Image (cartoon, rainbow, N blue to C red):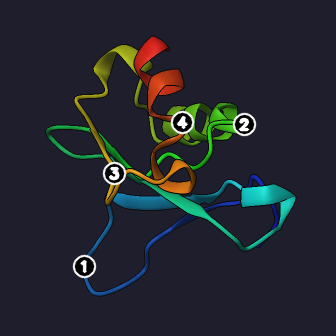
Amino acid sequence: MAIGDFETVAAGSCEDLHYADVGLYDTPEYGSVYVLDAERPAVVETGLGVNHDLILEAMDRVGIAPTDLEVIAVTHVHLDHAGGAGYLAEA
């Protein structure tokens, strides 16, 4: 994957989970965020925030407007996982 690439998870019958490479520290294939296109749309992880536009683009690709996003989930509060949460909340 390259920074900005977007893929759909292809495991079993999963059709509503997608991921985008946000290129942590400008490194391709290092840092993905997940976009869940479900009844309660969600983003899991947010990266550092420097490439938060890539998250918004990934959401747009699956038809989730920023105002429709219901959940921003981070696994823990390190900047490489939660640094972009404020940018998404602002959007």
Kind of residue indicated by mark 3:
Val
Q: Is residue 69 left or right of residue 22?
A: left
Kind of residue indicated by mark 1:
Ser
**Residue plotted at (46% across, 41% down):** 62
Residue that mark 1 sits on: 13
Marks 2,1: beta carbons within 8 A: no
Residue that mark 3 sits on: 74
Marks 4,1: beta carbons within 8 A: no
Image depth: mark 4 or mark 1 in front = 4
Q: Secondary structure at mark 1?
A: loop
Kind of residue indicated by mark 4:
Gly
Name the one closer to the observer, 79 or 20.
79
Marks 4,2: beta carbons within 8 A: yes
**Image quarter of residue 51:** top right
| Real-space CA distance between mark 2 and mark 3, rounded to the nearest whole angstrom | 16 Å
| Above or below, 53 relative to 9 | above
Report the residue that reaches farthest toward the left. Answer: 39
Task: Name the N-terminal-most of marks 1 and 3.
Answer: 1
Q: Secondary structure at mark 4?
A: loop
Task: Name the N-terminal-most of marks 4 and 2.
Answer: 2
| Real-space CA distance between mark 4 and mark 1, rounded to the nearest whole angstrom | 30 Å
Q: Secondary structure at mark 2?
A: loop
Crowding near pointer 4: few (<14 within 10 Å), some, many (20+)? many
Kind of residue indicated by mark 2:
Val
Residue that mark 4 sits on: 84
Marks 2,3: beta carbons within 8 A: no
| Real-space CA distance between mark 2 and mark 1, rounded to the nearest whole angstrom | 33 Å
Please provide percent x and percent y for residue 89: 40, 20
The circle drawn on residue 50 is 2
